[in-house]
Each structure stands twice: as C-alpha cells, then as structure tokens.
Amino acid sequence: MQFVPLFPVFGGYCTGLLTQTFHVDDFFQATATAFCICLMASALNSCFVRKHQAIAKINHKLLLNNVPYAIVLFLLNLFPFVASGFLYLSMLSKPDQVKLIDEVYPNLVTKFQALPNYVVFDSNFWAIVTFTFIFFGCAYTVLLVGFTTYHMFQILEENRKHISVANYAKHRATLRSLLAQFATCSLIIGPATIFSILVVTRYSHSQVATHWIIVALTLHSSANSLVMILTYPPYHHPSLPPLIDRRKIRTSPKYKLRDATLPR
C-alpha cells in the first residue's frame, strides 16, 4: 500500500497491490495503517512497563500485583483498537466526501471523480474525538516513558552495590536500547500529533504538511532497524562480528602489543 496525498485537499488515495489487485477499500487501508502505527507505540509502552516491573523487584517500590499489572498491559494494548475504531467512524461516506469537495474545492470535482477510490478528512465530531484521543495518547506515552525511565535508573543507582556487575550492565544496556527505540518512535508520535492538530484546526496548507508527515512515518522502520542492530546485543553481535572481534582484541587485558608477533 502507498498513500498518495491529494493537494490541496486534506486526504489522499492508495495505490499498490491491495488496491489494484484485491480492490481493498481505502477506508480499510487507512484504518489498518493507523492501527499498526498505534500498535507499535503500544508495544513500546508495554516494553517499558515490563522492564520497569522487572527492575522494581530489586527494591519492591511501585511493584504492581498480578491483577493491576495485567490491567495496565490490557489498557495499553487496547489503545490501537480504540484509536483505529474512532478513525474509522470519523471517515466520511462517499456522498459526504463529494459534497465536501464540491463546497470547498468545486474546481476539483471532476478530477476526484476520475479516481477509483480516495479518502478525504474533515473536522467532524468523530474526527475531533479521534485526534484528541491520539494527541493525549502521544502525551501519555511521553510521560509514561519519561517516568519509568527515571525511576528505573534511580533504582539501579541506589542499589548498585547490591547488584552484580553483569546484571547492572545488562539492565543499563537494555534501558539504552529501549530509549533509543523510543527516540525513533518520535517519528510516529510527532507526525501523529501534528496530523491531529491539522485536522482539527483546518490549516490552509495542511496537505503540504501531510506530505512531510508521510515521509517521516516511512523513515521509522529503517531507523528502528538500525537502532536495534546497533544497541540490542542479540542483534548487535551477529550483525557486526568483525567490529566486535576487533574491539575485543584491542580491549582484552591478555592481548598486548609487545607480545604480538607479525606473520611472516
């Protein structure tokens, strides 16, 4: 699926295998895309919560019981379903889309009629509910990640003397990887927040902004893959063996330059 913006209308249409071969409706494709984006953010939130609870077992501060812990994870994973459901309800029917285009851009009606399928957004009640929900969801994600990260580092520093060196290094490496993944998640949270504001405010140049929003969203997968390879040890070691082996040789206390002999 490839979403193509329709300047100057705040909307677009889809091209690709799902549209041309399977004739999947653009409404469904837009909803499925929103669901997948929200699912990635919810999965990252769940990772932070699970890691926080694992580290909280060290001093038993803010450690949740099984039932509250399950409720928190359930609510986090419920977010994609609610957000995508609201988005589907906010989409206009085909007659309403044609009416909106006829009222706002009457000179573009014939061009839109030539398209097999398209999606146009308007700031109706469900759209305001949807994007308000997404905006507060993004804000909640930032607060959740910020609080859990601060508390996890605080626990590790306060109990550093009681934790083995290996476990301490393991926890910090995992936290650094999660933080790096959250940094790439800004390519989802930032565009989604801006998109929400544009729909509600009816910004006159919203389509230009939408073009760059789509560009930012497509960068997330590549950026997150690089982060996983560079920061997560199970992916880092198999992907960069020459670099790791060279680093081990230089830092190994058993290896000294004066003891080395050059091959003849």
Image (spheres, helix red, strand yellow):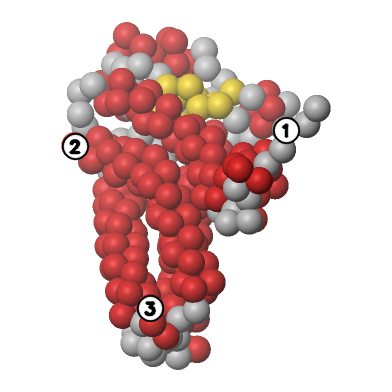
User: Depth-wise, is mark 3 or mark 2 nearer the camera?
Assistant: 3
- Residue under the point 70% across and 47% down: 238
Q: Quadrant of the C terminus?
A: top right
Which residue does the image show at 68% across and 23% down from the upper left? 20
- Whole-Å distance between the Cαs marked 3 and 2? 50 Å
- Could you tell me which residue is drawn at 54 percent across and 72 percent down? 166
Marks 1, 3: nearer the viewer? 1
Q: Amino acid at mark 3?
A: Arg
Q: Which numbered disc, 2 or 1, marks the residue closer to the eye?
A: 1
How far apart are labels 2 and 1 at the CA level?
Answer: 70 Å
Q: Circle 1 is placed at which residue position?
A: 262
Q: At label 1, which amino acid type do we have?
A: Leu
Q: Secondary structure at mark 3?
A: helix
**Above or below: residue 101 compared with residue 25:** above
Q: Residue at x 21, y 32 (%)?
A: 202
Residue 168, compared with residue 84, is above or below; it is: below
In what quadrant of the picture does the N terminus appear?
Answer: top right
Three-letter amino acid code of the residue under disc 2 = Thr
